[in-house]
Amino acid sequence: MPVSYIATIFVSYAIFAIACLGLDTIVGYAGEPMLGFTVIMAVGSYTFGSLIQSFSLPTPIAALVAVLVSAIIGTVIGLSSLLVSEDFLAIVTIGVNFLARAVFQYTPFFGGAYGVILAGGPQSNYAFVVFVLVALLTAFYGHWRLGESWCGLAWKSMREDSLASSSLTVHVSYFKLLSFFLGSIFGGVSGVLYIMFTGAIDPTTFTFVQSIALLAMVIVGGSATTLGVGLGSAVLVILPLTLAILGGYSLLIYGALIVIFMKYQPAGILGRGSYARRVLKLG
Amino acid sequence: MLFASGLTLIYGVLKILHIAGAGAFTLAAYSVVFLNILTHNLLLSFVVGPILVSVALPPIFLKLYESMLDGSPLIPLVASVGFYIVMEELFRLAFGPFILGFPFPSMKPVSLGSVTIPFGSISIIAISLPTVLLLWLFLHRTNWGLSLRATASNRRAAEMMGINTRSVVLMTFVIGSILASAGGVLAGIYYGGVSPPFGDNAAVLGLSVIVLGGMGSLSGTIVAGLVLGLASSLTVGLLPFNFPPNGMAFLVLTIILIIRPKGILGGRLV
């Protein structure tokens, strides 16, 4: 049974929200600028798709392997954070977008410019919607728990001052890599859900602009807060879909909104120190 | 390379990765096309177009970044990308989504023995080299250049020494826009046309050149521009499979950063 339009919007929201929660683990909690997060999603999607297409593995095993592979790739990208920091890392992670795109586009195994098409076609039944809902709730809970745990504490201290926290016996390199590893697990899950939802991907699905869009979702909502990230991705996923009625002006308004949010509420809608948080007394 | 040196200056002074500068790059190329249609005077449009852009855009950039300078560096970056999206869409609405032909008398390519150099490349060399030289003289031999370098090394301290850092920042955006416009016009000559996503490649490659050169170092930027350009065009032919020059540039970038994490000539300011 095909699902309704509302359910479709919900699934695309959930996929991006899971990715944003993962990105926020790296950018918000650990404070490492990561501008290539769609690469993680792409790795998840491509691994899942190729495993099913080329080796015809059963879906659950393929999904597990795909998530694991994206976590490993994420950790490898994270290795660069040990070498370079801050703005340098931002540029290196921008570069990863273009490298990954080149690899996917020019390797025959990944289908070249055609990408990967799932034989089963896109998933469109309510069982899948419920599955996505469960995944989304798990991701929310996981992200929130990570933030409150000893691990989140270590990340936050490292984000504020890595030198001071390493003098307090926080193993900075270990926690940096851990944030990339755990964040990439979210990213891999979201990538697998993405290809299940659309049924096909190609190298133009995951671009640099998409990475920036994910980052914008995190920052517009309020980084390092579970609610904020959930709200930010809701705003920036659903707005473009509703703005589509404006035709040619939709991208213009989308860009303008990002600028306005950054200018007047740089902490994010529900970020620490934002107006909404003061009014709602969320602390 | 011109565009990248503009970005480097802006990064050196403000620590902002100024992607929206690519908007100036595109706008300059468009303004030349349109002035030429209006006035039918090539020389006039090549001079006035970039000047118009360099006067109009800097105050907007200043307003955009003003309140973001002291927070997380990701905020101005995201705002910059957002602003670039807006500019690109405005170009699309104003000028249409197609490629507009660039007005230039078709000159014959120059032959040097067995090598033929297209006219576009010659004009790029003829304009870039003097501009970079002028930029260096400006930075190191004038009072304005001195106050710019002071602001780059420490904004607060420069303020205490009586430098009006606000106007220095504005001046930096003006210079950055002049360089970007010059780059845009040259790229227009080289590719023979301009379209809304004209600046995309320049934005991304410009950023990687900044990093490679050691952030905020002008001489490093020039060396890095050469290294990146040469490395990507030379190695593309050597690889067994087809690799886009863009991906190649970033592969080179990553490898060099692993060897020299601070960039080729990193460590010095402007």
Image: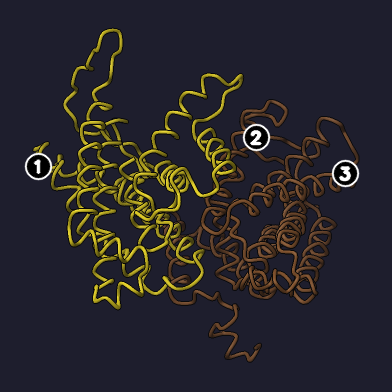
Chain colours: A brown, B yellow
Please report contact status of discs 3 and 2: CB closer than 8 Å, yes or no. no
Type of the residue with mark 3? Thr
**Residue A263: which quarter of the image?**
bottom left
Q: Which of the numbered marks, if any, corresponds to residue B44?
A: 1
Chain name for mark 1:
B
Q: Whole-percent x and y of residue B13?
A: 35, 62
Tag 3 residue: A59
Dot 3 or dot 2: first in sequence order is 3
Q: Are marks 1 and 2 on the same chain?
A: no
Chain name for mark 3:
A
Q: Are marks 3 and 2 on the same chain?
A: yes
Type of the residue with mark 2? Phe
Mark 3 residue element: helix
* A142 lies above or below A51: below
Q: Nearer the viewer, residue B263 or B30?
A: B263
Q: Residue at x 61, y 72 (%)?
A: A161
Q: Is residue A167 left or right of residue B166?
A: right
* Pointer 2 local density, CA inside 10 Å: few below 14, some 14–19, many at least 20: many
